[in-house]
Amino acid sequence: MSSEATSSDFHEPFVRALTRHERVIRAYIRGAGITRPEDVDEIMQEVSLVAWRKFDQLDNADEFPVWACVIARYEILMFRRRHARDRLVFSEKVYELLAEQSLEEVSSSMKEKRLNQLQQCVENLPPASRELVTAAYQPGSTIDKLASQLGKKTNTVYQQLWRIRRALEQCVEERLEAE
């Protein structure tokens, strides 16, 4: 394999994740009390560099926006310390509280987006698949009971649900990327 292909394979997931979630990270920075656009840009640049250096430590790419916002939190604190001599600044505790609240909002917003996309994907399933998923997640339902009701083997139902879950996961990811 050429070094160019290897380099591309390593860079592409990071660039995609950063590009996809940059607005969320910038919103987090602004939500933490950074109002001047040039300050947001400066912090965003530092966040990008740190995230790039540590990207291989991220276990789950779905957690990139929250992970990057945690990095942003530290970069905001460092920014504040560098600018602490300015007369019109809040205390570090106020900024810490703003950052915590903003991080909770980012995390909640991402979960809400994924849930909304999942709901749309479930609605777009073929009727038989939608009914199977709905039945499988009813309170008190078990795969054994469901298989018995459908007159199928338990393993068959597990396999069908596994395929449907994979299709739903792919659908959600595609819809989020398209946003």
Image: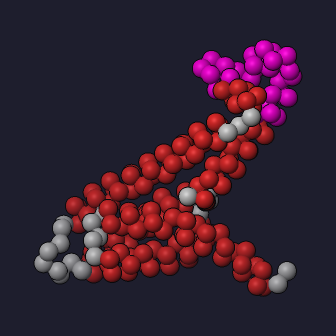
| Residue that protrudes farthest toward the left in the picture | 87
At a point 31% along the width and 63% down the height, the residue shown is: 32
Q: Which residues are magenta?
A: 135-161
- In the rendered image, residue 37 lying in the magenta stretch gets the answer no
Query: Tell me, what colour scheme is on the image?
Result: secondary structure
Tell me if 133 is positioned left or right of 40 in this view.
Answer: right
Q: Quadrant of residue 87?
A: bottom left
Position above or below: 78 against 163: below
Which percent across, then down, holds residue 167?
73, 44
Q: Quadrant of residue 168?
A: top right
Tell me if 27 is positioned left or right of 156 in this view.
Answer: left
Whether residue 52 is visible, yes or no, is yes
Q: Main secondary structure of the magenta part?
A: helix
Whether residue 73 is visible, yes or no, is no
Tell me if 66 is positioned left or right of 130 in this view.
Answer: left
Which percent across, then down, holds residue 59?
62, 59
At a point 64% along the width and 42% down the height, the residue shown is: 121
Give whichever of 98, 25 is nearer the camera: 25
Pick the quarter of the image with the C terminus.
Answer: bottom right
- In the rendered image, residue 149 lying in the magenta stretch gets the answer yes
Pick the quarter of the image with the N terminus.
Answer: bottom right
Which percent across, then down, holds residue 174?
66, 55
| Residue that protrudes farthest toward the bottom in the picture | 3
Position above or below: 133 against 34: above
Give whichever of 55, 22 is nearer the camera: 22
Which percent across, then down, holds residue 164?
74, 38
Tell me if 170 is positioned left or right of 149 in this view.
Answer: left
At a point 56% along the width and 75% down the height, the residue shown is: 52
